[in-house]
Structures are given as structure tokens and as C-alpha cells.
Amino acid sequence: MARFLARFAFALVVAGATYNPTRYSYYAWVRDTSWEWRPPIVFVGVVLLIGWVICLRLTLRSIGGLNLLLANAFLAALFWLLADWGWLPIESVDAIKWLGLFSVTAILAVGMSWSQRRRRRSTNPRPDAYTPRP
């Protein structure tokens, strides 16, 4: 569980630093500078790009592109259903943005953890513990 939470935190930092509804995001920072590309902005952008490549590559390798698409479609349909029932505050744009941020984070964290879970379940953790029957 600790490894999953670490992956979730990493995905949340990458996605949340890139964009969130507050003024503390890369998008807001670049927008406030009138889209002037200065060295600190480019450096942080490259660091965020590296984080996105790590997250997406691990996720795509473990669950694949189709399952990534299905996970997004599932959450979108679920949120639409909950909004239709009146359980989501669709009038609050910031709440929807936060929901989207945590949805992307959850999908990336599950995707990054999926290969580790599958590997643990498919291999014998202690090969010397196996004793054949006589």
C-alpha cells in the first residue's frame, strides 16, 4: 500500500503542478508571464515533461492504451451519471477541475502500480520454498 501511495503522490505532484484550479500551477505561471519563454519556465517545463513521460510510459506499458482509454471513459460516464443524479456540484467549475485532476492521478497511479501487482502475483516469491511431492 505504501508503494501505491508513493506512486499516487508522484502522479499528483506531476499532474497538480502542471495544472490545477489555483494560481500555483505551471499553466498559471506561464499564463501570468504572458507566455514569455524564459529559462526558469523552460526548465520547469522540461522537468514536468520528464515526469509526464515517466507516468504515461509506465501506465501504458502496464495497462495498455485501450485500458487507459477505457478507464477514462468509465470515470467520465460515472461522473456524468453522478452529475445527472445531482450528486456532483456541476455548477462549481473548480470542483469539476479538482475531480478531473484526482481522476487523472488515480488512473496514472493504478497504471504505474499494475505491473508490480501482476509481477508479484505471477511469480513464486520464494523459489526455495517449493518442495515437489514424492
Image (cartoon, grey):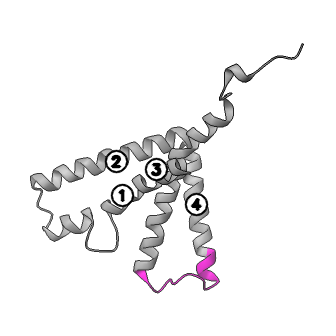
The quadrant where residue 117 appears: top right
Q: Which marked residue is nearer to the observer: mark 3 or mark 4?
A: 3
Q: Say the numbered circle drawn on residue 13.
A: 1
Q: Which marked residue is nearer to the observer: mark 2 or mark 3?
A: 3
The quadrant where residue 16 appears: bottom left
Residue type pointed to by label 3: Arg
| Between discs 4 and 2, the one toward the N terminus | 2
| Between discs 2 and 3, the one toward the N terminus | 3
Q: Say the numbered circle drawn on residue 85.
A: none
Q: Callout 4 environment at 10 Å: few (<14), some (14 to 19), or many (20+)?
A: few
The answer to whether the residues at label 2 and label 3 have Cβ atoms under 8 Å apart is no
Residue 2 at x, y percent in the picture: 52, 51
The answer to whether the residues at label 1 and label 3 have Cβ atoms under 8 Å apart is no
Q: Residue at x 43, y 46 (%)?
A: 56
- As helix, strand or loop, the secondary structure at mark 3 comes to helix
Front residue of 112 and 67: 112
| Between discs 4 and 1, the one toward the N terminus | 1
Above or below, 107 relative to 79: above
The residue tagged 3 is 7
Q: Say the numbered circle drawn on residue 73.
A: 4
Front residue of 11 and 78: 11
